[in-house]
Image: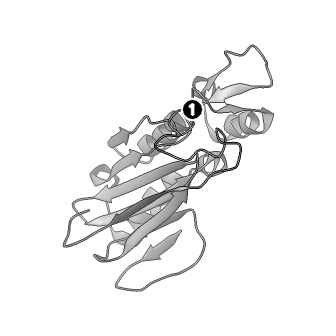
Amino acid sequence: MVTSTNRQRVMGKADGMITGDPGIYLAMRFGDCTPLIFFDPVRQAIGLTHAGWRGTMKNAGGATVRHMVTDLGCQPQNIIAVVGPAIGPCCYEVGPDVMQAAAQAFDEPEPLFNRRNGNPNRAHFNLWAANQQQLTAAGIEQVIQSELCTACRTDQFFSHRAEKGHTGRFGVIIGLKGGQA
C-alpha cells in the first residue's frame, strides 16, 4: 500500500494507493483485473486498488479500507467503493489454481463460481462479486458495481484475455481537487 499524507509523496510499486491530499492524483492501468475506486466524502480521502485474482484472494480491497481507516482516519461506513470494469463472470474461465485459492480465501467460495461447462477442473469466476463480498465485510455500505466486462467490451476497454495478450491497458485516475473527488 502506498500512502500519501501531509504532502509526502511515496513512490514505488503497489497494488493499492490512498491519499487525503488534494492535488495528488492516483492512477493505475488495467487490462482485465478489477479496479477498485474509493472515496470518503467525510474525510475527503481517496483510494485506488488493483485487484486481479491474486489480489482478490489476498483481499486487496479490504486492505485498502483498513489503511484508509488507520492511515487517514476514515470510517468504513463513510467510504463509497466502485468495482470498475473488469473481466466478468461471463468470460473469466479459470482453473484449479484459482478455485483452490478461493477455497482458502472465502468462507463460501461456491457462489463465486459457475461450472456451466461441465468440466470439474474449469469454472467461470465472478471477480465482481468476490470483491463486493470483501468490501462489504470490511464495513463498506455503499458498493457501486460497474458490471462492465472488459472481454465483452473490447470496443471500450482493453482485455488481455479477449485480445490474447496483444493489447494495451486502460487507465483509472482519481484525485481530490478543492475537496471534491
User: Where's residue 75, x and y in %?
Assistant: 31, 58
**Element carrying mark 1:** loop
Q: Amino acid at mark 1?
A: Asn
User: Does residue 140 sit above or below 107 in this rendering?
Assistant: below
Q: Does residue 159 appear to the left or right of 134 in the view shown?
A: right
Q: Is residue 14 visible?
A: yes
In depth, the one of 108 and 61 nearer the eye is 61
The quarter of the picture where residue 151 lies is top right
Q: Does residue 60 appear to the left or right of 73 in the view shown?
A: right
Q: Residues within 10 Å of mark 1 (few under 14, many from 20)?
A: many
What residue lies at 38% left-to-right and 47% top-to-bottom? 82
Q: Does residue 147 appear to the left or right of 78 in the view shown?
A: right
Q: Does residue 76 appear to the left or right of 27 in the view shown?
A: left
What residue lies at 30% left-to-right and 77% top-to-bottom? 23
The residue that mark 1 highlights is 126
In depth, the one of 102 and 118 nearer the eye is 118
The quarter of the picture where residue 30 lies is bottom right
User: Does residue 48 sit above or below 125 in this rendering?
Assistant: below
What residue lies at 77% left-to-right and 33% top-to-bottom? 95
What residue lies at 65% left-to-right and 27% top-to-bottom? 124
User: Where's residue 4, x and y in %?
Assistant: 42, 77
User: Where's residue 158, x and y in %?
Assistant: 55, 47
- Quadrant housing the C terminus: bottom left
User: Where's residue 16, x and y in %?
Assistant: 51, 63
